[in-house]
Amino acid sequence: MKAFVKIFGWMSIAGAFLLFPPVSEAGSLGAMRVNLVQGDVQVKIADTGEWVPASVNMPLVEGDELWVPEGSRAALQTTKGDHVRLDEGTALQILRMDLGSYQFHLTEGRVYVLNRAPKRSVLQIDTPDASIRAFGNARFRIDIPGGETDVSVFRGSVQTENGDGTTTVRAGNMLAVGTDGYVELSPAPPPDDWQRWNSQRDRIVLARGKSYGYLPEELRAYSSDFEENGRWVNVPEYGYAWTPTVVVTGDWAPYRHGRWVWRGGDYVWVGYEPWGWAPYHYGRWAFAANVGWLWVPPARGDVYWAPGYVGWVRTGDHVAWVPLAPRETYYGYGNHGRYSTNITNVNVNQVRVTNVYRNVNVTNSITVVNQTTFITGRPSSVDRNVVGNVREDFAKHRNIVVGRPPIKPAETSYIPVVRSIPEAKRPPAAVRKIDAKELRQSRPLVTEPGRSAFRPQAKPAPLEVRNVEKPRPASERAKERQQALPKERRGPAASQGSPPGTVEQRGKPKEAEPKVTGKPERPQPPPGKVTPEPAQRGGPPGTVEQRGKPKEAEPKEKAKPKEKAKPKEKAEPKRPQGTPAENVPPEDRVREEEERGNRR
């Protein structure tokens, strides 16, 4: 322990100020969270590049990647109320979060989207061959069967674009975009288990219970969390407050069941309760004798996300925190509204803490861990005397930490939950090779409907689409295209979504190419007959040279059929002058035909 304390030991507040750049990233940190984890879902942390177990209520940032293995499911939620759900076998990268607009890249698998964002924002999901953008309320899913992209819309509409153009997919339809540029529109397929599961979750998050009315408008996107896990009570001092009815452990207190992780340059609380997002990052906590712990929501217009509204004490090799009561000051980096102090670019040694920390007097309200537990997330016991000393520190304003505790993060500080993942559930090699930074550079976020997602400076062309009466699986669509004849590939159905001149190259076997470009050796015509068809069709180079050869070379071409002319004399060719064929020698007929060809 002495060696550990020597490495991670006490640092002064001034030292912490120099160690951690005082940059607030609260806005981006609070923009998106994981709100459902079923099974062995994993996240690749953008800061470390390591795959770690995912946890409910962990904040997500640009560059994070998710992998949902077999037998698992996950869901993401944005502050605007968007829900993005991932089925098993899905790899998703988070590319951008920009002023209420979000961009993802779906590499494989399938996602379902409930988009509730305002019209001025966009939710964009790119796939290897397409880009799908929702500019308003919409419900849709994206599947990648066999590498193709299927977009099914259930409400509203989305813009779908590939390298050839863009089209609008409306409710009740499915657009299939092939890897070869083939595009097919059909009615949406019947609901499957995945669709039914999403519809059920939609009904829950869209329901407007009592919580919807008690919450400020900015937090109504989370009303289902409150509705399903607690009740509202009217407290004389604070008005309507929420109390959880689902208790994880007997010694439960706010900010107890979870851990602090290093994200975006700050320690952020990750609560393991299913509702543990809004009550830990907004508002304050109070205690009522006849009710228990109460969460008091912030006032309308004063809603600010924070890493965790707590007060800190640091003593020896222990760290402690207590929930802030209503109207107690939060000291953080950035603007957190009324009852907060922005300590960015401030000498924290000169900050005078005015809080009385009322919740310190509540039994079991203070959480104390040793520094090892704080860094690794692995629990260990703490002596009761330490808890008593910390309570006295809060009361006497001793060892108070302004801002975050001055503890340098280690690799384990980024892991939201400590648990093992079976080797069979880890991301496959193809998913591990994906680089979100490279995808971000190649696929821009385009928020204007009139601009192309592939070429933002250009206006997208209309995408030609083949309409079919019923949806077909990707294997059937691919098989049909592989079996298509060259003429069929040149038809309207094949050319939709394909650049000029590429249909034959994509769909035709190489050995068939000479039949299209022309034959190097022409079959010999019967005596007395010259076939003008190649010249009329504008034949390929080579046919002109044959007609332009010197006359002495001509008998070589005609010598072989000359002996066979006798049996063919009955088939008299048409002669413009009406001269009987039997009155003209064969060699004169050939010469006469050549001279007529030269005059033409």
Image (spheres, helix red, strand yellow):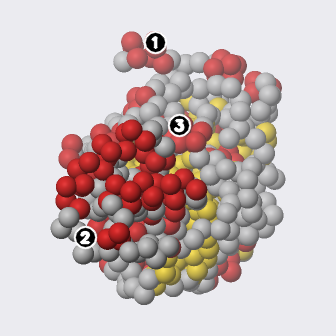
Give x and y (percent) for residue 98. 69, 51
Kindly report the distance in space between the C-alpha atoms of the residues bearing marks 3 and 1.
41 Å
Name the amino acid type tagged 2.
Answer: Glu
According to the picture, the residue beneath numbered tag 3 turns out to be 438
Q: Residues within 10 Å of mark 2 (few under 14, many from 20)?
A: some
Residue sitting at 56 percent across and 83 percent down?
Answer: 171
Give x and y (percent) for residue 112. 47, 69
- Location of residue 562 (image quadrant): bottom left
Instruction: Name the front one of labels 3 and 1.
Output: 3
Name the amino acid type tagged 3.
Answer: Glu
Kindly report the distance in space between the C-alpha atoms of the residues bearing marks 1 and 2.
112 Å
In this view, the residue in front, 593 or 547, is 593
**In the rendered view, would you say 85 is above or below 313?**
below
Q: Residues within 10 Å of mark 3 (few under 14, many from 20)?
A: few
Q: Is residue 269 visible?
A: no
Instruction: Name the front one of labels 3 and 2.
Output: 2
